[in-house]
Image (cartoon, rainbow, N blue to C red):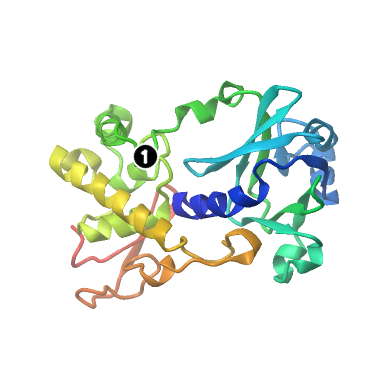
Amino acid sequence: MPELPEVEGVVRDLRPIVEGKTIATVTFSDIVYASHEAGKQAIVKNAKPYQFEQLLTNMKIEKLERRSKYIFFHLNKSGESFILVNHLGMSGAWFVVNDVLEITEEKFRKHIHAVFTLASGELLVYADIRRFGELRFIKELADHPPLLKMAPEPFDDSACDFFLTQSEKPKFAKKAIKEVIMDGQVISGCGNIYATEALFKLFIHPGRVTSDLSREQKTELFQVICDVLQESIDSGGSTISDYRSINGGAGTMQHRLKMYGKKQCVICETNTESIVIGGRTSTYCPQCQK
């Protein structure tokens, strides 16, 4: 958490506010600095915090883009292009305010780790309660090779064929289908919540071996995943735990979920069960999902 729909919501909300504006200064929290001094890299990756602050000064934010679960800030300085890559981790959140005191939820206000002061006077604030998120400054995607391995966007014309091809590779064919569809090298942006929902809609057990599904079943599953992701985008995402859109905004998809986090099946009223797949807890109905 957050997954593709939540990140898409953040980008859509941030885009009209910050695109075209210039970053005057950047400051990072003492916690970020202390982590680097201790040999760790909380939030800020692949550079020292003071280097980030210098690099980002006077950068113009030309465009915001979502790619899978990442936010790309496309920047320009003196005609040279750069990308600030942001992953929200488990609890990252963005705020655009005139003063940090305008951030009403104390748990976010207490965990501010980056403040981008815009030339317009506004503050673009990144808060992260659990500090699993990241900010990474690169010149091109090849500077961080994992970005090159991302599957196509699920709504792209090539995405279904890509999924089918990947799912047939030995690396994935013998894995549980839930683990495969949560892998960003197979489908971009589908995590625990929406994988759980899609599998339930088709009554597929999350632990079922991928190679046991026919090509037709996998094609249908891919389409259902796209449908669930789109429904969530339209609903502003799922506000669960610490996820917020910008300035503390909330989505409503959590009210539409049929299996994720449920104690009882909404169809047969059987108590749900849970197993760990790919390091994530997977909830399912033992009666409906085979």
Whole-percent x and y of residue 258?
A: 31, 68
Q: Is residue 88 visible?
A: no
Q: Which residue is mark 1?
A: 187
Residue 104 falls in image quadrant:
bottom right
Q: Is residue 103 above or below residue 277?
A: below
Residue in the picture at 67% in, 25% down: 81
Secondary structure at badge 1 equals loop
- The amino acid at mark 1 is Ile
Front-lying residue, 175 or 260? 260
Whole-percent x and y of residue 164?
A: 24, 34
Whole-percent x and y of residue 120?
A: 79, 49
**Residue placed farthest to the bottom in the image?**
269
Whole-percent x and y of residue 41?
A: 73, 39
165 displayed left or right of 127: left
Q: Quadrant of the C terminus?
A: bottom left
98 displayed left or right of 250: right
Front-lying residue, 82 or 287? 82
